[in-house]
Amino acid sequence: DICKQEMTIMDGNSTEIGHVYQPFLGGGFSPTLQVMDRKGDDEPVATIKANAVCCIAGLCCDHTFEIEDADGQNIGKIVKTKPSSLGELAKELTSDADVFAIEFNKDVEPNRKASLFGALHLIDYMFFENEGEVNLDIANGQLSFKCCDCYCLGCVCPCSCTLGGGGGGDEGAEPAMDKEPGEDESFEENPEEEEPAEEEPEEEEPEEPEEEEPEEEEEEPEEEEPEEEEEEPEEE
């Protein structure tokens, strides 16, 4: 079944004498448990139902669960009592201690009485284990505490109240925890601090040598050799 809680009660010889379980969808909006003489029986011998709708648990009032037999007759009740003094309030806030009272008719069989005691422990586990839980975060100046539980179709959703812890910027940031060497660290890299990737140099294509045009050599003018004058012989 969906969101089903159950408990089997045994005697000192490990013989089953009772079975407590949630019906299909947990009884709707009111917490409900059914008691059977043994697991697998067709009909429950008793039904336990809370006198509450949707909201359950909390330290401000008593919480009563009525017990009815198979004929719908009231044969008892289980009561989670509210703290009667500051001492009891401090005890419930700082521990799992709770105060319960149980009543049933004298003609109830002993084995069924034991099953009803087992149902009391199941109720405590389901709704009152973390009742009034307080968490104090000194570093962030935050206080949270559990107010009550919301119950719907067998599901329990805790409702808590948180005070403080406001502020913007880095004031509300949680301090960094030192990690032991060898632990993997995951972080986001700042893109501004990233070193630019080294660019691979592009291969330059070898330049083809330019063909040099042959320079025209200036022809130096040839020096004209002076013509030798032929001396004519003088006549005597």
Image: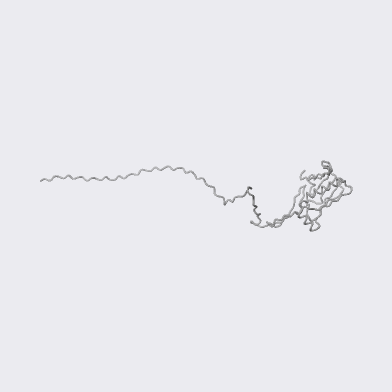
Q: How is the image coloured?
A: one colour
Please indicate whether residue 223 sits to the left or right of residue 189 in the image: left
Q: Position of residue 52 (x, y in %)?
A: 80, 51
Q: Position of residue 168 (x, y in %)?
A: 65, 57
Residue at far right of view: 107
32, 39: nearer the viewer: 39
Above or below 171: residue 204: above
Q: Quadrant of residue 161?
A: bottom right
Please indicate whether residue 194 sits to the left or right of residue 224 in the image: right
Image quadrant for the N terminus?
A: top right
Residue at far bottom of view: 86
Count the labels in the image: 0
Q: Position of residue 99 (x, y in %)?
A: 81, 53
70, 189: nearer the viewer: 189
Q: Quadrant of residue 21?
A: top right
30, 107: nearer the viewer: 107
Please indicate whether residue 141 sits to the left or right of residue 191 in the image: right
Q: Position of residue 42 (x, y in %)?
A: 83, 41
Q: Quadrant of residue 171?
A: bottom right
